[in-house]
Image (spheres, helix red, strand yellow):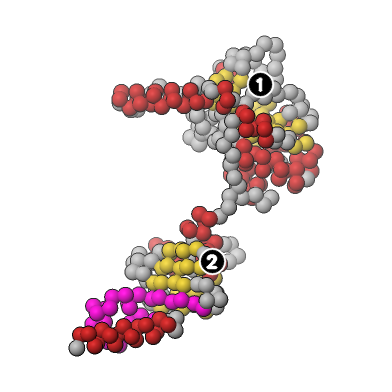
Amino acid sequence: MWCCRLSHLHGRLQNLLSRGVTCSAFQQPNFKSLFPLAIRWHHTASNSLNCAWQQHEDHFELQYANTVMRFDYLWLRDHCRSASCYNSKTHQRSLDTASVDLCIKPKTIRLDETTLFFTWPDGHVTKYDLDWLVKNSYEGQKQKVIQPRILWNAEIYQQAQVPSVDFQSFLETNDGLKNFLQNFLLYGIAFVENVPPTQEHTEKLAERISLIRETIYGRMWYFTSDFSRGDTAYTKLALDRHTDTAYFQEPCGYNNYDRAVINTVPYDVVHRWYTAHRTLTVELRRPENEFWVKLKPGRVLFIDNWRVLHGRESFTGYRQLCGCYLTRDDVLNTARLLGLQA
């Protein structure tokens, strides 16, 4: 009797699967205990669409566009783009995420052409275009092509012969600006040439790609070796490799000069810190990892403080320098507006 019943259920299941559809339950007593897999949804679309999906106990699995994606059910309910859940004019949610059952699961799922429909226990229907799910899935994001970053040293950078961008091209054409930003994203440094050597023109250059960040040094800083701010930068002394504003709440990076007293960790951790510091310093001071540039009036250098350290040798004579700090979000946003994957 058991074998006959199991054979009957298996045959019925295979018949339904061959047609590409299964239902959530069969009209058989105790079917869940007899055939646990049958309580899961499984749907294979036509071969031309090359799409398949399966409803698991705790997530929804979709295979489409050569990508296997997994979605939490709460995520699927929360990202509903229906008029009652999402304001398409402001691109903001209307749905109160905190009101959704943390254990929510769809009551039914169906595929119509290239659109998935999820019906929830309260009767609300959420629909998703398959391409939208690919674009916004975790797995789809991992495959997304981003602007490459090149890990380089002095030899690699010199052999690449990275071109500078002319001041007028930078200011007046999107192509010039895009070429500059592409170099900046690739290497973390980029040059603009033929800039009138004034603070006003340097400021105008910076504003082309970002808001200028106000700091304790002002909007634009302009200094020489007069020690006016009690900082080594305002002297003729050499500056070791560093990044600026390490003491900010949102720092640009590492700065050995401005390192505070280490008094927040025990002695054994302190020694490990010094060991790590020594390893880092040795790497930074290797000649092959240093790229020396002699700045001259009219040449502006942009540096990504998250990637590239900078410094200087000691000097004699008189030197004036001006510059500013930019907001990283705005620099990357400008790059994206020009079609770069920043």
Amino acid, disc 2? Ala
Where in the figure is residue 277, as x and y percent of width and height?
43, 25
Where in the figure is residue 49, as x and y percent of width and height?
54, 74
Where in the figure is residue 225, as x and y percent of width and height?
64, 15
Disc 1/disc 2 C-alpha distance (Å): 56 Å
32 is within the stretch colored magenta:
yes
Rendered residue at 59%/16% (across/down): 238
Asked whether the viewer can see residue 317, the reply is: yes
Amino acid, disc 1? Phe
Rendered residue at 35%/26% (across/down): 272
Vertical comparison of 294 with 139: above or below: above
259 relative to 9 in the view: left or right: right
User: For mark 2, what is the residue?
Assistant: 65
Q: Closer to the camera: disc 1 or disc 2? A: 2
- Badge 2 crowding class, 10 Å Cα cut-off, few under 14, some 14 to 19, many 20 or more, is few
Q: Of marks 1 and 2, which one's residue comes earlier in the chain?
A: 2
Rendered residue at 39%/85% (across/down): 15
Asked whether 326 or 306 is in front, the reply is 306
Asked whether 46 or 243 is in front, the reply is 46
Where in the figure is residue 188, as x and y percent of width and height?
61, 36
Q: If the image is split into quadrants, where does the N terminus sit?
A: bottom left
- Callout 1: helix, strand or loop? strand
Magenta-tinted stretch: 22-46
Q: To which quarter of the image does residue 157 belong?
A: top right
Asked whether 311 or 93 is in front, the reply is 311
User: For mark 1, what is the residue?
Assistant: 223
Q: To which quarter of the image does residue 184 belong?
A: top right
